[in-house]
Image (tube, rainbow, N blue to C red):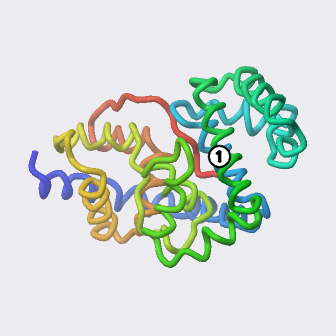
């Protein structure tokens, strides 16, 4: 299927679905309050690692308060480097997140980055001072383990104004691309543009389409007449 036909097919599905789910989409936008957190950067980095590869990891690392309290920035800053490394590794394993040792290395690397930036509040201020979407993406990608998807998703989770026309491409959306017959070799930017074009033609912004494709996956599958495969990703975080 060529891009034009694929776009037409998906637009027809999401335009109707978005109208049906409008109230729920609006409710998910309330996640913007997370940007007010003084530890915004640290919390959303942890959240990214908890869900990376498997959304259920959120429950073990973020939702489990006993685990979460042990890896707040403040808790880790009070430890020696050796004790900090040991604690992060133990918590990641106890949380049941995917690739716990690799994620522990990411978290420790991010701790060093945040510390060099002056702590979570200073890091947040530096992020928000970056002008426009691309500069903020570049800033977030400087943290270990954060690629183009999560650099977008962190800001999309709080419905930041610079990221309302963004798509956090994950295995679910890639599965939709495959079902529509799009080439698997499409660069990130090109595939994102495809979905942003779908969003515009359906009367949505990119954030709304992204969250619609995630939160209502079953309905999208049914209406496209396909069965999509792939692990979970994080929900629209609130």
Q: Secondary structure at mark 1?
A: helix
In the rendered image, which residue does mark 1 sit on? 110
Image quadrant where residue 4 sits: bottom left
Can you give x and y, in whole percent of width and height, for residue 149 in the image? 44, 49
Side of 189 relative to 64 (left or right): left
Task: Give the quadrant of the N terminus.
Answer: top left
> Where 140 sits versus 48, above or below?
below
Quarter location, residue 157: bottom right
- Residue located 77% across and 63% down the image: 37
Residue lying furthest left in this view? 2
The location of residue 100, given as percent across then percent down, is 63, 24
Q: Residue furthest right?
A: 78
In the rendered structure, the answer to whether residue 52 lies left or right of residue 92 reads left
> Which quadrant is home to the C terminus?
bottom right
Q: Residue at x 28, y 34 (%)?
A: 226
Rendered image quadrant of residue 210: bottom left
Q: Is residue 72 left or right of residue 99?
A: right
For label 1, the crowd category at 10 Å Cα-Cα, with few meaning under 14, some 14 to 19 and many 20 or more, is: many
**2 vs 18, nearest the viewer:** 2
Q: Residue at x 66, y 39 (%)?
A: 107
């Amino acid at each position: 299927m060529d891009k034009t036909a694929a776009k037409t097919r998906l637009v027809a599905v999401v335009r109707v679905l978005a109208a049906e789910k409008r109230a729920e989409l609006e409710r998910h936008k309330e996640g913007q309050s997370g940007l007010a957190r003084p530890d915004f950067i640290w919390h959303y980095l942890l959240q990214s690692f908890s869900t990376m590869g498997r959304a259920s990891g959120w429950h073990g690392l973020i939702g489990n308060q006993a685990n979460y309290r042990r890896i707040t920035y403040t808790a880790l800053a009070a430890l020696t480097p050796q004790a900090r490394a040991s604690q992060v590794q133990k918590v990641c394993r106890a949380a049941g997140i995917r690739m716990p040792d690799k994620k522990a290395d990411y978290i420790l690397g991010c701790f060093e980055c945040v510390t060099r930036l002056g702590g979570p509040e200073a890091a947040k201020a530096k992020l928000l001072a970056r002008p426009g979407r691309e500069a903020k993406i570049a800033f977030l990608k400087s943290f270990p383990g954060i690629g183009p998807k999560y650099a977008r998703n962190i800001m999309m989770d709080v419905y930041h104004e610079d990221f309302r026309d963004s798509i956090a491409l994950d295995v679910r959306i890639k599965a939709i691309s495959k079902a529509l017959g799009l080439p698997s070799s499409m660069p990130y930017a090109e595939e994102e543009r495809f979905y942003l074009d779908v969003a515009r033609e359906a009367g949505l912004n990119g954030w709304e389409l992204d969250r619609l494709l995630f939160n209502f996956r079953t309905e999208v599958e049914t209406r496209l007449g396909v069965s999509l495969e792939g692990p979970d990703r994080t929900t629209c975080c609130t």
